[in-house]
Image (cartoon, helix red, strand yellow):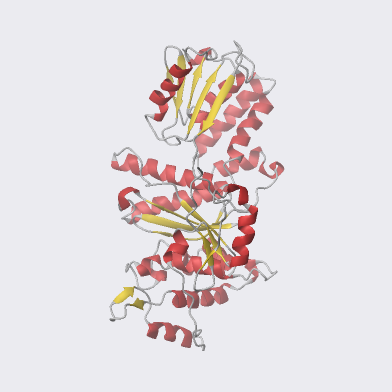
Amino acid sequence: MKLQDVRNLSYRADLMITGAEVDILERDNYLVARSPANPDWQCGNFLLFADPPSNDNAAEWLAAFQREIADKQPTKHIQIGWGLNIGLSLKFVLDDTASLWKPISMKPRLIGKPGSKYHVISRFVDRQFAMGDDASKRIFAQIMFSQAAFTGVEILTYCIMSNHFHILLLVPERPDADLLDEQEVLRRLGKIWNKNKVEKLKATFANMREISVEGDALVERELDRFRRRMFDLSEFMKDVKQRFSTWFNQTNERKGTLFEERFKSVIVQDGQALRMMAAYIDLNPVRAGIVTDPADYLWCGYARAVGGNQDRRRGLRTIMTDPRDTRPASAHPWKNVAKRYRLWLHDRGLETHHRDGRQKKRGFTRAELIANWDAEGAIPPSTLLRCKARCMTEALIYGDQAFLLETIGQLRAKIPNKRPKANKADDGFCTLVNLRKPS
């Protein structure tokens, strides 16, 4: 089957758009569209046959998809299309076009209401030090920030370690389509694509409008495909991990999965819970013994903020703003925010010891803690907040009991537990953990 045999406008548009990113292979009786860098992309990983399936060849089609796509790269779907002529139908009628989409069942991820904050973490397979040098960390940071600019998520703070990474982010509400018009979508694509690729897409859109009376509708359909990747936590994380995996595998001449599993995500409440989570993230290099002050670790949000990065300072302003404060985060002077957050880091980063005096957890000494507070003419609180690391990485929701109960109520249909319960810790905060898989 030849590429030029495809006359259906929908499939022609797909193949025109994906041509630069997808390997298109011609077989005897079907076409293969395969995207090694983006295995979960529906429009980039499918088989296209000329005629609809029958009972005799349905199993053969599924085997062909497994052989051509699933065996070559990890994928979470099965997509097979058919029909070369104009027309779109889900009926099994000769000369019609249809597309079968079968998502593979996965453990549900809890997604909060628009504007929710999340802590996400992902580790490399076998805990290998895939980002053991500054060059790898720099590439990951560039990918992370460019993908955030495209999707619209706001990175509040982060920490890139050698064998894993943490990101604390906010996912804003998706704006109306009018605010994501063609010009805005192309501008955002310029954050993750080079100029030539964007210009090629513009030319493709112009070609669609020229060759078809339905050109505007085809262009709008492709724009919707890009819009769906915006303001979405899973799409943001998928693209970040896939882009870095592609770079790493090409650089190191390797193949296969780089990350050990799906990323973990925790819905985080505003206020004190958000500050605790931010401190946990920025203190990672101190706890690991890499530096004695997080400001000295180049690959965390706090160090970048101290260095003058306005985006990172904006993130810390959001973190340190009381949710009851009606003023915008930008109204708080950076000097005040910086002092408060540094005091908070010293409070949260105090070293701990076993009963026999052996160091249990690296951090600031009590003398450093007191000196930090004395520099501001204050004394540390008598009770320091404590929270186990598991609350920060294994939980699905993190906050006080009222916040957890409210969020559980909003997401009840997506939580597989019959009786989800907020687990209360000694510090007064609660977590929702250990969700059973659906039976």
Residue located at (60% from left, 53% from top): 112
Residue 109 drawn above or below residue 168: above
- Residue 271 locus on image (x, y percent): 59, 69
Against 96, residue 405 (above or below) is below
Could you tell me residue 207's position as x and y percent?
Answer: 61, 24
- Residue 256 placement (x, y as % from top left): 34, 38
Answer whether residue 307 is visible to the viewer in this image. no
Snapshot quadrant of residue 357: bottom left
- Relative depth, front residue between 65 and 33: 65
Q: Quadrant of residue 75?
A: top left
Please state which of residues 61 and 370 is positioned toward the viewer in this rendering: 61
Q: Is residue 363 left or right of residue 100?
A: left
- Between residue 135 and residue 401, name the one nearer to us: 401
Q: Is residue 426 left or right of residue 330?
A: left
Q: Is residue 381 left or right of residue 366?
A: right
What residue do we see at 70% from left, 20% from top?
A: 213
Q: Nearer the viewer, residue 266 or 368?
A: 266
Q: Position of residue 83 (x, y in %)?
A: 57, 15
